[in-house]
Image (cartoon, rainbow, N blue to C red):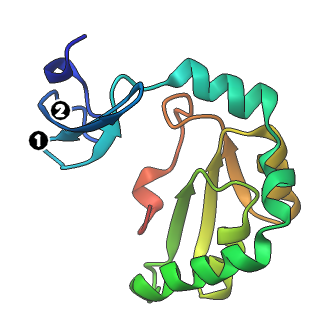
Amino acid sequence: MSMSQAVCPGCQHEGTTPVGSRGSLHLVRCTHCTLVYSHPLPVAAVRAKYVEQYDLADHFADWEPRKRVLYDRRLGAMPRPVGGRRRLCDVGCGDGQFLVAAAESGWQPFGIELNPPAAQRTRDRGFEVAEGTIEEIADLPWNEFDVV
C-alpha cells in the first residue's frame, strides 16, 4: 500500500501527506482530520510486545508520583468538566493512573488498554476499561464521551 492509500484510523479518509520517518516508522497526516499516525500501522509488533511480552502495570508502578505531575498538567490544560459533559475516554490508559487524576478532577473516566495486566490494574482501581484495540472493540460508547 502506498502512502497516499493509507486509510486514517480516525476518520477513514484516504488522503495523507508525509510528516517524516525514523527507522521503520513512517508518519503521515490525514488531509481531512489532520490526525498524524504511523503508516503502515505496526499492529503485529505492538500486539506481540504489549500483549505477550510486557507488563505495563509493573513498568509504570514506580513512575506513578512523577507521572502524576504530568497528568495534573494535562488536566489543567483541558476544559473543566461541566454539567453533563463529564465523560472522558483515555485510549491506552495503562494501569489507570491518569484515570485516577481525571476522576479527582471531576471527570467520569473510561479506559481502553491493550495490555492485559495493565487493564486488570485499571479495573482493580475501580474503573471501567475495555481491553483490546480500538479496531477490535466494536461496542465502544463513542457518543457518550465528551473528551477522548
In this rendering, is residue 108 above or below 22?
below
Quarter of image, res 126? bottom right
Q: Which three-letter amino acid code belongs to the residue tagged 2? A: His
Residue at 31% over, 34% down: 21
Q: Are marks 1 and 2 in contact (CB under 8 Å)?
A: yes
Label 2, on which residue? 13
Residue toward you, 21 or 79: 21
Quarter of image, res 69? bottom right
Residue 69 falls left or right of residue 121: left
Point out residue 53 in the picture as x, y percentages from the top left corner: 80, 29
Point out residue 118 in the picture as x, y percentages from the top left corner: 79, 49
- Quadrant occupied by the N terminus: top left
Point out residue 66 in the picture as x, y percentages from the top left corner: 71, 77
Point out residue 19 in the picture as x, y percentages from the top left corner: 21, 41
Sequence-first disc among 1 and 2: 2
Residue toward you, 80 or 27: 27
Label 1, on which residue? 31
In this rendering, is residue 36 above or below 75?
above
Residue at 33% over, 27% down: 39
Residue toward you, 58 or 120: 58
Residue at 84% over, 49% down: 120
Residue 64 falls left or right of residue 6: right
Element on which disc 1 rests: loop
In this rendering, is residue 51 above or below 87?
above
| Other residues around mark 1 within 10 Å, as few (<14) / some (14–19) / many (≥20) | some
Instruction: Name the residue at the top extreme.
Output: 1
